Image: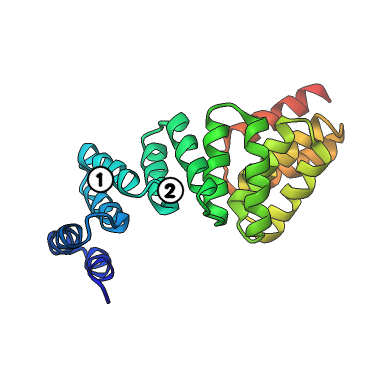
Amino acid sequence: MDKNQQGIALLQEGKWEDALKLFTEQIEEMPNDPAAYINFGHVLAEMNDGERALKFYEKAVEVDPASSAAHYALGSFYFSGERFEESAQSFERAIRNGMEEADAFFMLGLSFLYLDQTVMALPYLMRSVELDEEDVEARFQFALALAKTEQYEEAEKNLQIVISREPDHADAFYNLGVLYAGHFEQPSEAHRYFDRALDIQPDHMLAGYGKKLLEKSE
């Protein structure tokens, strides 16, 4: 087990200072290894020292611009700080440098969604779902993006998969209600979905509002 792995084990045990000591030694011994800088940044982020954490993530990218892990770590940091343009750029670089994990595509897609660039988000969310079909949250966000781009049938199909895998997903039932009330014009089905959302989450304001609008229009 190298010092990076030992440090990660200590970090998981909550022994931050000991972990930092090992990561410092690793940096001194292998200054061009991005992993130690990334791990050092993770510790600082856990300690709520975001300013210094950012410097270590940036250093990881600097020492190895081809490190997909370094770009992903920097992207995650930007995303947590709601710096979505920068997170999108970093996640895109992570993918360009060979990261083929579903989460990288999901985070890039999500960054574009928060930037209100749904068309840009769609292919990355689709790829995320292709790589990990069991990821309910990725599929839910993909369904929302499909609905926003007026691909209603595909959105409905994916929302049905979401509720089949997570029967208590209130937001998925609410969005099915919206689809059936609006695009499909089936108010009785919409009622059923809004009611199910409210059964799961009685304080679901949007589902409650949707149900009231339906009742007024009847």
The answer to whether residue 44 is above or below residue 54 is below
Q: CA distance from mark 1 to mark 2?
A: 13 Å
The dot on residue 39 is none
Where, by quadrant of the figure, is residue 8 drawn?
A: bottom left
Q: Earlier in the sequence, mark 1 or mark 2?
A: 1
Kindly tell me whether residue 49 is visible in this rendering: yes
- Count of marks overlaid on the render: 2
Residue drawn at the location 57% of the way across and 55% of the way down: 102
The amino acid on which the numbered mark 1 sits, given as a three-letter code, is Phe
Residue drawn at the location 27% of the way across and 77% of the way down: 1
The way the protein has been coloured in the rendering is rainbow
Residue that numbered label 1 is attached to: 56
* Residue placed furthest toward the top: 217
Residue 174 spot, x, y in % from top left: 67, 40
Residue drawn at the location 83% of the way across and 31% of the way down: 183
Q: Secondary structure at mark 1?
A: helix
Kindly tell me whether residue 197 is visible in this rendering: no
Residue that numbered label 2 is attached to: 72
Q: Is residue 118 found left or right of 4 in the rendered image?
A: right
Q: Is residue 55 found left or right of 110 in the rendered image?
A: left
Residue 121 spot, x, y in % from top left: 62, 36
Residue 118 spot, x, y in % from top left: 64, 31
Foreground of the two, 124 or 16: 124
The amino acid on which the numbered mark 2 sits, given as a three-letter code, is Tyr
10 Å neighbourhood of mark 1: few (<14), some, or many (≥20)?
A: many
